[in-house]
Structure formats: structure tokens, C-alpha cells
Amino acid sequence: MDLSPAPGASTAAEVAAAASVDPSLAPDASTAAEVAAAASVDPSLAPDASSSAKAEDERFALLMSIGEECIQTDELRLLLQNKEKAFPICYDGFEPSGRMHIAQGIVKTINVNKMIRAGCKVKIWIADWFAQLNNKMGGDLEKIQTVGRYMIEIWKAAGMDLDGVEFLWSSEEINKRADEYWTLVMDIARRNKVKRITRCCTIMGRADNEELTAAQIFYPCMQCADIFFLKADICQLGMDQRKVNIVKKAIHGGRVEVHGEAKNPLVPVRITNRD
């Protein structure tokens, strides 16, 4: 015979004891009914396994909604299921190179806010050194950085959720961890032929048959390195960045890119949109 108390028996005893000590503590009829109801097992109150799946589906749909293409949707699913990655890192970057257009100002704000609502931490890479390599603003780094600060102010005014965003200046971050960064760049450069790298130069707004400076040829290798350097899980970039992302994939395997991509120990996802 099982002599263990029936469900709710200890609760009933505690309530009775409390009532005998102090009548003011005695529950009224409705409270007693609630105690009895809580003590009984109601299958409908059991944790709903479908609720976490629903939340995952909502996060997945939010991330997919920001891009025209997602490379490795299965990897994106796995990333969202990974309990150790409570806040996946999303990478986006830009060259401060002049006046901001609608897609940069409004569409990027909408997309960044969606990534944050999907539970991601967003790193926005302010590629000031890249703009200098690409001879933007005449290669004047001070002017380039002024344009970068102007763009941040526009995003603030447009309603970007800055609590979930970290702005990182490439010149500062690379100098802080130069040994790590340039090792990545050299590794990528060693693994690729010049012809393949020049085909990626459309990422700079240059034609692949255009005469390029040595600095501009170096640019795609650096952009490949950025993804690993920032430990990104999701890369959100424009369709014009697709070629260099495929180089990343060939070197290091897949990363989740909604459009973006690459792999370090983490394998990011690429989600791509058209600005």
C-alpha cells in the first residue's frame, strides 16, 4: 500500500495549520477552490512542447523576412535551436562613403530591429579602413569617420534599437587585435588566386575588369576575415556581396548568411537582401 499523501494533502494541512494559528490567515472560499485546483493535476497546464517550437518558427520567419536569399536555412534552424547560443551574433557592415540613401537609412533600421526582435545581438562594422582602401572621400580617413558618425545619427533618428546594437570601427578593432586579424587575412590570401579575388571586387562597386590598385585587391581578403574576426553567427549583407561570401564558404565551410556567410568554429548563416 502506498502511504504517501494524496496530491495537495500537505498543502491542505499547511492551510489548516495557518488557519488555526491566525484566523485572519484562513483562505476564503474562492482561495480554497484555487488551492484545490492547483493541487490537482491539469494536463492543460503542463509545459507545452509546441510553444518553444512556435517561438523558434517566429524567430526563423523574422530572420528570413529580411533577406532575398538565405544560404543554409537548415543551419539557421540549428542555430536557433542551440541553447548555448541564446543571443546569436548578427554581422552587418558598411563603408562610410557619402550621403545615406533610403535603403541604408530606413531599410537597414527595419532589418536590424527585426534581428534584435529575433533574439540576436547585432554588430555593425563601420568599415572606415575599407573606405580608405577603396579611395572613398579621396582616401581621407578623417572625412570618412565623420561620415560614419553621421550615418549612426541617422539610424538613431530612424528608430534603430541601439540597445541591441554594437557599432565597431574597423580601424580601432583591427589595431586592438592586429595579430589575430592579419593572420586571418594572410590565410585567406594564401588560399586564393588573384583572378578569383578580382572577381569579388564588385563588392566595392568596381567592375571585375576594372584596373584596381593593390589595396583594392586586398579588400576582399579583409572582408572575408571580418566574419571570423567578429565571431558572427549570421551575416546580413547585400546581394552585391555574394561573391566574396562564396569565397568564405569555399575556404572555411558554411556559415548562416541571410545573405552573408563563412565559418570559424561557429559556422555563420548568410541572409542577403537587395538594397
Image (cartoon, rainbow, N blue to C red):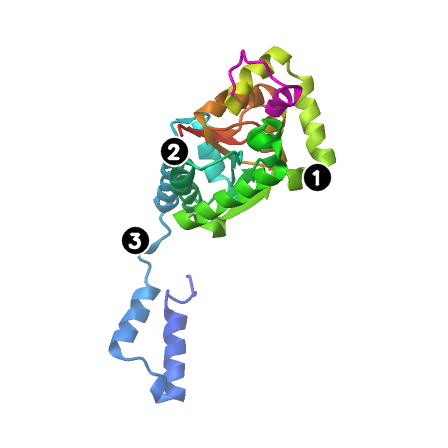
Residue type indicated by callout 2: Met
Callout 3 amino acid? Ser
Residue 163 position within the rendered picture, expressed as x and y whole percent measured from the top left: 48, 52
In the rendered image of this protein, does residue 69 appear above or below residue 158? above
Q: Residue 141's quadrant in the figure?
A: top right
Mark 2 residue element: helix
The residue labelled by disc 3 is: 44
Which residue is located at x 59 percent, y 36 percent? 128
Labels 3, 2: front one = 2
Q: CA distance from mark 3 to mark 2?
A: 32 Å
Considering depth in this image, is 68 or 160 the residue closer to the camera?
160
Residue 84 visible to the viewer: no
Q: Which residues are magenta?
A: 206-220
Whichever of callouts 1 and 2 sits on the residue coming sooner in the sequence is 2
**Distance (Cα) linking label 3 and label 1:** 56 Å
Image quadrant in which you'd find residue 191: top right
Q: Quadrant of the N terminus?
A: bottom left
Q: Is residue 174 left or right of residue 104?
A: right
Q: Residues within 10 Å of mark 2 (few under 14, many from 20)?
A: many
Residue 64: which disc? 2
Which residue: 33% across, 83% down? Answer: 26
